[in-house]
Every structure is written in structure tokens, then in C-alpha cells.
Image (cartoon, coloured by chain):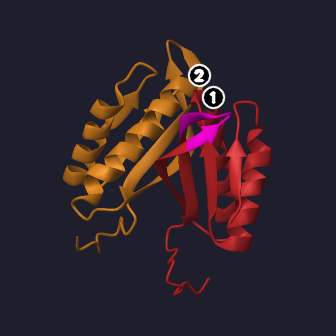
Chain colours: A orange, B red
Amino acid sequence: MGIIKVSARSRTASVAGAIAGVVREKGRAEVQAIGAGAVNQTVKAIAIATGYLAEEDVHIVCVPTFVEVVIENQERTALKLIVEPRDYSPAGTRTG
Amino acid sequence: MGIIKVSARSRTASVAGAIAGVVREKGRAEVQAIGAGAVNQTVKAIAIATGYLAEEDVHIVCVPTFVEVVIENQERTALKLIVEPRDYSPAGTRTG
């Protein structure tokens, strides 16, 4: 699955559209952000995508976790936010 | 329900403890943040609280929404993150 990487300069509407598109197509999206500005844009984008998908009766939630990533030979701690429908089941029992 | 207000200077471990405590006691927590630094601390705190509660077999998710708040006579847009178990049911069918 593709990871959506968000920066402090990412436009929230664009990221929201990307998140909604990936959730529709793949069932869940992974969004990665490093730094306060990027995390802020990510959470705003998820709030917007929640509205988009609610219109389609898809009710998403997010689960944040820490991940270590290497950027230009430096290890950094990123936040990864998994976005998926509340009733999402990795086992494939989802009917929606 | 009490709202947990997070600032850019809030300690993530303290906020994580507060979130876990409110979820244990009330079933869900509402966390409010204004500005990128505060949102970043909030998401990190939720990631930490997720670990705390997972040890008790409580698997939380979060749902971000925008809210308008008035601070010192100025209207500002805050992010409110509702934190609750994935299987939380407001109708009271939860058995955990």
C-alpha cells in the first residue's frame, strides 16, 4: 500500500482528497508526517476526509503510531496515522 | 465529560496518562488543541496512550473534527480529537 507523505507545506484539501481516494480504493490509508507542521496538516486533512467519506456512509477513524524512518542518512521519528473505516477488518469480513 | 486541553508545551506522557485515565473511567475522552505545536503533542500523546490501553486489551481510535472556540473574545478554530475504543457504542451496548 502506498504511504501518503505529508509536509508542513502540504495543502490540507489535497491530502484529504488523497486519503479519501486511497480509503475508497484500498480500504485503508497510511499517512506519514515528521514535525509539528506536518502532523497538524495531517490531522486537519483527516478531519476533512472524514466529512467527504461520511457522505458515502463510510465512517473513518485514525490510529497514530511512532515509526523510525531514515532520511538523508539520519534516523528520525515520524508519526504514522492509519486511516480506515471504524468497522474495518483486516481478515476480510468487511461487507461495506 | 471533561475536555483535555493540550498546548504546545504540554508533556506528552502526562497527556497520555490523562487520556488513558479518562477512557478507562468514562469510556471516551475529548482532546482539544489549537495550533500546530499543540496538535503535534496531542497526536504523540494518543500514540502513547494507545500503547498503555492496548496492554489492557482496550484498542482505541481517534476521530478528529474542527470546532470553533472563543478565547479572549477571539474566535479560533481548534481541533477536537475524540478518543474511544474502536468498538465503542454510544448506545450502551459495549460490554467491556
- Mark 1 lies on a secondary structure that is helix
Q: Position of residue B33 (x, y in %)?
A: 61, 40
Q: Chain of mark 2?
A: A
Residue at the disc numbered 1: B37
Residue found at x 28% / y 62%: A58
Residue A90: give its label: none
Residue found at x 58% / y 59%: B83
Badge 1 crowding class, 10 Å Cα cut-off, few under 14, some 14 to 19, many 20 or more, is some
Residue B63 drawn in magenta: no
In the displayed structure, B14 sits above or below A92; it is above
Residue B72 drawn in magenta: yes
**Residue B8 seen:** yes
Residue furthest to the top: A72
Q: Chain of mark 1?
A: B
Residue A75: give its label: 2
What amino acid does circle 2 point to? Glu
Q: Which residues lie in the magenta part?
A: B69-77
